Image (tube, helix red, strand yellow):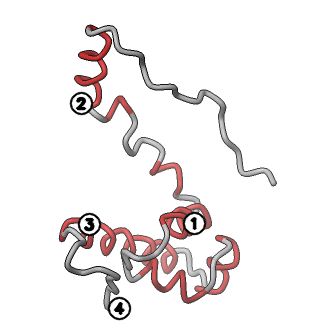
Amino acid sequence: MPKTTIRNPDRTPARTVEVAATLGRNIALARKRRRLRLADVAEKAGITIPTLRAVEAGNVGTSIAAYIGALWALGLEDGLIPVAALEFDPEGQIRERAALRRGLAQPRISRTPLDDDF
């Protein structure tokens, strides 16, 4: 298994390293199950092969965009949509209701759907 490279090991929480490593392993396994080469996934994701290797190694210094690009290239990006969504954020729901009761403004949320047509 590739070694995870950490830019600032003294300040990176252990759980962050664990999650990145697990996500990287999952991306690598998904690519291998599809019998895709590193070069093919990297090209489709718009990243370099070394960057894809860093993603698959769970490198916490690698851009989140590289992780998302790799997931998109594998057809798995929709799994990220619910991350931090209000319906899956009980603490956020509580805080939002409390703010409404106090008369504070709600955060602005864009309702414009995004697409990957470019």
Q: Which residue is mark 2?
A: 90
SS category of the residue bearing label 2: helix
**Circles 4 and 3: CB distance less than 8 Å?**
no
Q: Which residue is mark 4?
A: 2
Return the x and y of residue 79 as percentages of the image width and height. Answer: 45, 50
Query: Image quadrant of residue 96?
Result: top left
Quick one: label 4, few (<14), some, or many (20+) residues within 10 Å? few
Left of 76 or right of it: where is 114? Answer: right
x 62%, y 66%: residue: 73
Sequence-wise first label, 2 or 1: 1
Sequence-wise first label, 2 or 4: 4
Return the x and y of residue 104 as percentages of the image width and height. Answer: 35, 14
Disc 4 versus disc 3: nearer the observer: 3
Query: Image quadrant of residue 1?
Result: bottom left
**Circles 3 and 1: CB distance less than 8 Å?**
no
Sequence-wise first label, 2 or 3: 3
Quick one: label 2, few (<14), some, or many (20+) residues within 10 Å? few
Return the x and y of residue 10 as percentages of the image width and height. Answer: 20, 79
Q: Which residue is mark 3?
A: 16
Q: CA distance from mark 3 to mark 1?
A: 23 Å
Residue type, numbered disc 4: Pro
Residue type, numbered disc 2: Pro
Quick one: label 1, few (<14), some, or many (20+) residues within 10 Å? some
Q: Say which of 55 and 27 sits in front.
A: 55
Q: CA distance from mark 4 to mark 3?
A: 17 Å
Q: CA distance from mark 2 to mark 3?
A: 21 Å
Q: Say which of 92 and 82 sits in front.
A: 92
| Vertical arrangement, residue 32 with respect to residue 20, above or below | below
Q: Which residue is mark 1?
A: 74
Disc 2 versus disc 1: nearer the observer: 2
Count of marks placed on residues: 4
